[in-house]
Amino acid sequence: MSALTVAMIVKNAQAFLPTCLRSVKPLNPDIVIADTGSTDRSLAIAQEFGARLIQIPWKNDFAEARNQALAEARGQWILSLDADEQLDGTAAAAIAALLQNKADAGFQVTIRNYVSSPNERIWDQVPKPNDALLASAAAYPAFVEHENVRLFRRSPDIYFVGRVHESVGPRIKEVRGTLGRANFAIHHFGFVIGEAAKAEKNNRYREMGRQKLKEFPNDWQSHFELGLLELEQYRNLAEARKLFARACELNPSAGVAWYFLGLTIFRMGDFEDALNFLRHADHAGHRTALVAETRGDAHYNLGEFEDARNSYEAALKRQGGSGGVLAKLCLATVRCGKTERGLSRLRVALAENPEVAELHEGLVLSLVFLNRLEDAAAYGRSGRTGRGPLGRWNWDSRHIRADRN
């Protein structure tokens, strides 16, 4: 019996599949690919790599499709991958050691989601600079991490649940299995595909998310997942607010849901109400830099510049440093009457980080607020105000809007 089966579902993945399968070759695995209707070279590529193929109808249900692949697995362990994912050169030794584990039913695996900009956000995570662990990912400046159970024992009691954002984690929890933490990463490229492919993917996930909500009407996670899609991809603020509010009602300890409820309400312009829900996020233990920063944005828009300044300071402490947050902090410092303190901090930051456009714009806005228009104009003419609009915020001398990517 093979020690490991790599189980996948695939459709029209010829652009990614060769690299994915090449990356798992050092594991010498059994490979099962469930194809849901490819019309490109995906089937031929799978056969070239020795995969066992099954063809299944697509029923708008990722869990069902993955479980059909699991049913064909022969390995004692399963590694679940997608075609737009890869392993790096350190993974084979790490996985070989984990397969000797006698206690755990599965492992939480870190997934690196590559992004095209260091300012891009996925969920509420701050991107990490690309450390070039995977050479083929060198073109991307940063990645955002999340975890999922991707390596687990083959067992009839362990299978995927959830039509979309599916996982075996809930089943392992139900059968009281233990979860370890893997020491390898999966590299994911699904967020750096073309705009047309993104739009098609979002539409498909939206439809499945709505179906999942009908199937699990009391599951906070299902409401939260669909809320994220409505907020970030469709800018449907009213629907996102309703979904996040229901998620918070179903699970009051879900701090991330409170944060996105507060962010949604902030974007709707109700800054007082937003602050209330952002405080709930903090109280639920979701004490992230973005919670503090968005709280600062709300205070700023209410004209509460000292409170804004304190919130931005908290954001910097939580995150460890951000040019955009520092620019906001200095502008709020100027606006609450501490003029020289704010300008001095901005100039020091600019001397250390002259490439950060937000810092240049923060200085210009501070000078405009102080009615030092000639200084602001001269600084602008000098060409030192950065290149192009802010990537994460649209802001002027009166308002800061959290229009994050």
Image (cartoon, grey):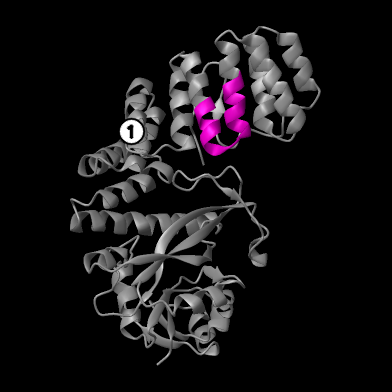
- Percent of width and height locating residue 112: 53, 59
In reply to whether residue 166 is colored magenta, the answer given is: no
Give 18 or 253, whichever is nearer the viewer: 253
Residue at x 61%, y 28% (from the top left corner): 326
Q: Does the rendering let one see residue 206?
A: yes
Place residue 280 in its image quadrant.
top left
In reply to whether residue 326 is colored magenta, the answer given is: yes
Left or right placement of residue 355 versus residue 203 in this view: right
Q: Does the rendering let one see residue 385?
A: no
The stretch of residues the image draws in magenta is 313-330
Residue at x 43%, y 59% (from the top left corner): 147
Q: Which residue is mark 1?
A: 283
Badge 1, how many Cα within 10 Å: few under 14, some, many 20+? Answer: few
Question: Residue extending furthest bottom?
Answer: 1
In the figure, 93 relative to 28: above or below? above
Residue at x 48%, y 48% (from the top left corner): 122
Left or right placement of residue 212 versus residue 27 in this view: left
Give 191 or 255, whichever is nearer the viewer: 255
